Structures are given as C-alpha cells and as structure tokens.
Amino acid sequence: MDPRLERLKQRFFQVFGDQGRHLTVTRAPGRVNLLGDHTDYNEGYGLAANFPQEITVMAQRRGDGMLGMYSCEVEERIQVPVHNLRYVPGDGWANYPKGVMWSLENAGEKLEGMNLLIEGRIPQGAGLGSSTALAAACALAASSVEGFQLEPEAMAKVLQRTENQFMNVHSGILEPLCILTAGQGNALFMDARSLESEEIPLSLDGALMVVLDSGVARSLKTGDYAKRQEECREALKLLKTKNEAYKALRDVKVLAYERFKKVLPMLLSARAEHVVYENDRVLKAREALKAGDPAAFGDLMNKSHRSLSRLMQCSTEELDTLVGLAQADAACFGARLTGGGFGGCAVALVREDGLDEFLERLKRGYWQKVGGKMKHWVLDTVGPASEIVED
Ligand code: GLA
C-alpha cells in the first residue's frame, strides 16, 4: 500500500477499530470551470476539467445501521443512524456524507451502515468543487461497501440532490458530471440539459492553464448565488412572453436575445445577457480548444470575466484585481474567475515558456495591490473519481 494510504489505514483503525472486513478506498478530484459559469442552472453548456487536488475516503462496512464519519482535517468523529438522516447545522462537514446517504436511499439503495474516514486536500470555498468531490468520494465508497452500482449520470443526480435537497444549495449538474467522468488530460464539454458530454484534449499549443487562488473564500450559502438563480428565472418568465417555447435561458440564442431584450428591466437584462452570451462563448471555446488555439480561447476567457464581473456581478475586488493583472501580462492569453464567484479562484491561460516569470510578477503585483498572498496550481488534470484498487 502506498505510504499515505498506509498512514490513513492506521488512523482508520485508531478511530473506528477494525471490523475485519475489506477496506475500500476512493478518491475524487476537484474541478475547474474553464468556460461557462452560471450557465448550468440555466440548462446551458460548460467546459471544465478535473483539478489535481483530491479528497480521499477510506470505508468499511458495519452492517449495524450506523454511519460513522471522521474528518482528518477537523479531527472530529460523528456517528448517526444511516436511515432518516437530517441536516443538522452543528454537524458541519458531516452533513455532506450524511446527505449522500440520504440521497442514495431516496434513489432506492438499501444501506446497512459503514465507517468513513475522510481526508481532503482541495481548498474549500475556492470554487474548485471541494464539496462535490467530498460527496462523490463518499458516494463511490458507499456503492463499493454496500455492493451496488450506479451509472455516472444517475450518480451525478444523486450528488446534485445531496446539494439541492439536503444541503439546500441549489447548484447545477455540471460539477458532479465533470468530477465523475472527465478523463485525465482532457477538458469536458457538457450540456446541462441532455447531460451529453464530449472529452477534448486540454492541449493549447505551448500554453498551460493555471489556477490562481485570490485567498478570499466564498460560500454558496450566503444567498448571492441563489439570488442570481432567482433573477435568471425572472428574466426567463419575461422572455417567454416573446416566445412560449423557451424552457430555460439556454433556449434563448444571441440574435433572439438582442431582439427581445427590451422586455427586461436593466438588472434582469444584464443577468440574461451574461447567460446567453456565455453559452455562445462555451460553444466557441470548444472549437478553439479543438483547434488548439490559445489566443482564441484566451480572448473568450477575457470576455467571460468581463461579463461575470459587470453583468452577473459575481466577482470581487480581489478577483478583478487578480484577473486584471493576469490579463495585462504579455505571457497571458486570457484569464477569468472560475466557479460561482463571490470570492475563490481564477483561471489563466499562460505561455508555458514564460510561466515562472508570469507567476512571480503576478504574486508581486497582487501583494502590492491587495496586500494578500496568491496561491497557484498548474492544471495537470487527473482522471474521474474512482475506487483505488491495490494490487
Ligand atoms: C457553483 C455551482 C455550479 C455552478 C457554478 C457557476 O460552483 O456549484 O453548479 O452553477 O457555481 O457556474
């Protein structure tokens, strides 16, 4: 066993004892949206890739109807019956594994109880999908321990229901889909309505994607994210008066939007404009990626950020500064905030041969302007969430 897993195993036995049964190990990566934000809950498109930092879960069957959970970060153990689970604010992190079990039972799976040890390495509140990764690693652990199998689409829906109905965070389906299916070295183009997806090699002629952390955490629970969803629903209602066939903002194409936008008050028109053009940009970015064209891809990233900041108003001063510094750098093809916004990370497309100097300039500039430290990760994409099988 690899030394890290060996260490986790020792911890597992210390915390839970050994039931003498097989130990299952699962892992799930974070994800980075390369283009297409605030599109998924409008049934639109997204282009994302898996982030190399991961959550690892070690699990063992109990069979006594109890769910034991331990977080290595928080160093806390929580135990509850595996049936009739409820969200309890005081349970903090443990609400995620609880929510997954609740969602699996709702999907018709019979659970008999297990112990879960969780080790997370994905920065939280950074827009990198740490919660979904946690849920994905727990769901795969449950499926192995309890002996059932779900197709990735069904599993993605289980994860989305965990967030929407148990955690009361109304996030979309693309993040679970990406974490469960995107292959190593690839970006994943996804359609949030049909759930169809296409893997495209993340290879842009001499350029690399770099994730930049503004150091300001965000939470989807604060209400801004839910407010954007509400505003998009309102905009759709008004646009429907022009075309009844619209089922979601995804159905409104650029030309139709320009023709009908007069029915929208200013704020709603800004939100809708972002969604309509962002969907269009994702389709164009898919082509730029297939052509391996960093300049075209970077230009779409810049336009996306401008739209997220000015129209969707989900950026922050820190993110705008960080993205602005990156965009102004000669080594950078383009940069944008990534994820829901309101804090968290940005992603930049940078010339590989100028990467080190770019990062130095950026860190210095960010420190001078914001007084904060910026962290970065080069996006070496990894494979989808999986069970780790030792030989
Ligand atoms: C959050 C949600 C996603 C998506 C993004 C914005 O990360 O979890 O479903 O809506 O915001 O693109």
Image (cartoon, helix red, strand yellow):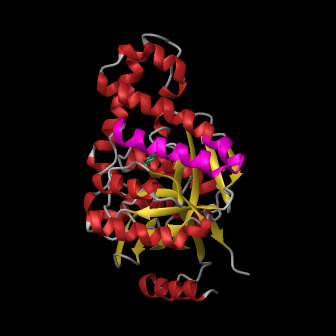
Residue 112 in magenta stretch: no
x then y, percent, for residue 56: 53, 72
Residue at image location 36% in from the left, 71% down from the top: 364
In this image, 151 relative to 62: left or right? right
Task: Determine whether 151 is above or below 12 in the image.
Answer: above
Q: Quadrant of the C terminus?
A: bottom right
x then y, percent, for residue 251: 54, 24
Given the current orientation, which residue lies at the most extreme front position? 330
Residue at image location 54% in from the left, 45% down from the top: 299
Which stretch appears magenta?
285-311
Q: Which of 192 and 75 is in front in this view?
A: 192
In this image, 296 relative to 376: left or right? right
Q: Which of 282 and 113 is in front in this view?
A: 282
Q: Nearer the viewer, residue 172 or 360?
A: 360
- Residue 62 in view in this figure: no
Please identify the quarter of the rendering in which residue 94 is found. Answer: bottom left
x then y, percent, for residue 237: 39, 19
Task: Determine whether 95 is above or below 292 in the image.
Answer: below
